[in-house]
């Protein structure tokens, strides 16, 4: 005899996420790209700038590339695993290696030429000043 499983919203959400991708960050999603390494990213906005921070422990600046195409920021690179020690077997190996790529769409235009980036203690910080949006200019109408 078959038993019925109790309904769980968590299981349903998991199935939806598997089918359609994560719904929680859909506002900044760009074309899907499967990476072997996932890097967490935070985006903070204040009145003058965006600050993007990405955790990239053990990855050198030479192995990271940051690009901005209009409002789409892409961080990509390669994480290299430690070399295997000859004659030894791993009892546990949680450090992954491979390529990574994260693309997010910034909600506002930024001054790309004035952006700064710093890699320190495994954290990449990128700062973009917000672009000064042109205000609407009202024209006076002259009558002839």
Image (tube, rainbow, N blue to C red):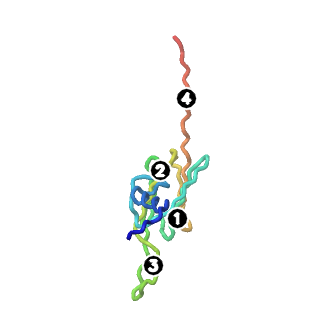
Residue 135: image location, x then y, percent: 56, 34
Q: Earlier in the sequence, mark 1 or mark 4?
A: 1
Q: Dot 2 surroundings within 10 Å: few (below 14), some, or many (20 or more)? A: some
- Residue 123, image x and y in percent? 54, 64
**Residue ID at (54%, 18%):** 141
Q: Where is residue 110 in the image (x, y as percent from the top left)?
A: 52, 46
In the image, farthest residue toward the front: 1
Q: Nearer the viewer, mark 3 or mark 4?
A: 3
Alpha carbon separation for disc pair 1 and 3 = 19 Å
Please tell me in which quadrant of the rendered image residue 21 appears: bottom left
Q: Is residue 88 left or right of residue 57?
A: left
Marks 4 and 2, the one that precedes in the sequence: 2
List the residue tagged with mark 1.
55
Give the x, y percent position of residue 137: 55, 29
Q: Specify which label sits upstream in the sequence, 3 or 2.
A: 3
Residue located beneath label 3 in the image: 93
Name the front one of labels 1 and 4: 1
User: Which residue is label 4 attached to?
Assistant: 137
Q: What element carries label 3?
A: loop
In this view, the residue farthest toward the top is 144
Vertically, is 1 above or below 118?
Answer: below
> Which of 18 and 66 lies nearest the eye of the viewer?
18
Task: Report the residue marked by disc 2.
Answer: 105
């Amino acid at each position: 005899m078959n038993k019925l499983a109790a309904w769980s919203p968590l299981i349903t959400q998991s199935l939806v996420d598997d089918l359609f991708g994560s719904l929680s960050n859909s506002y900044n999603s760009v074309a899907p790209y499967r990476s072997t390494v996932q890097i967490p990213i935070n985006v903070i906005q204040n009145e003058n700038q965006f600050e993007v921070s990405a955790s990239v422990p053990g990855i050198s600046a030479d192995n990271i590339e940051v690009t901005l195409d209009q409002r789409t920021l892409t961080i990509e690179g390669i994480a290299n695993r430690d070399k295997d020690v000859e004659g030894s077997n791993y009892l546990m190996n949680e450090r992954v290696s491979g390529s990574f790529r994260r693309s997010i769409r910034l909600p506002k235009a930024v001054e790309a030429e004035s952006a700064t980036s710093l890699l320190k203690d495994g954290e990449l910080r990128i700062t973009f000043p917000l672009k000064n949006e042109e205000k609407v200019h009202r024209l006076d109408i002259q009558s002839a």
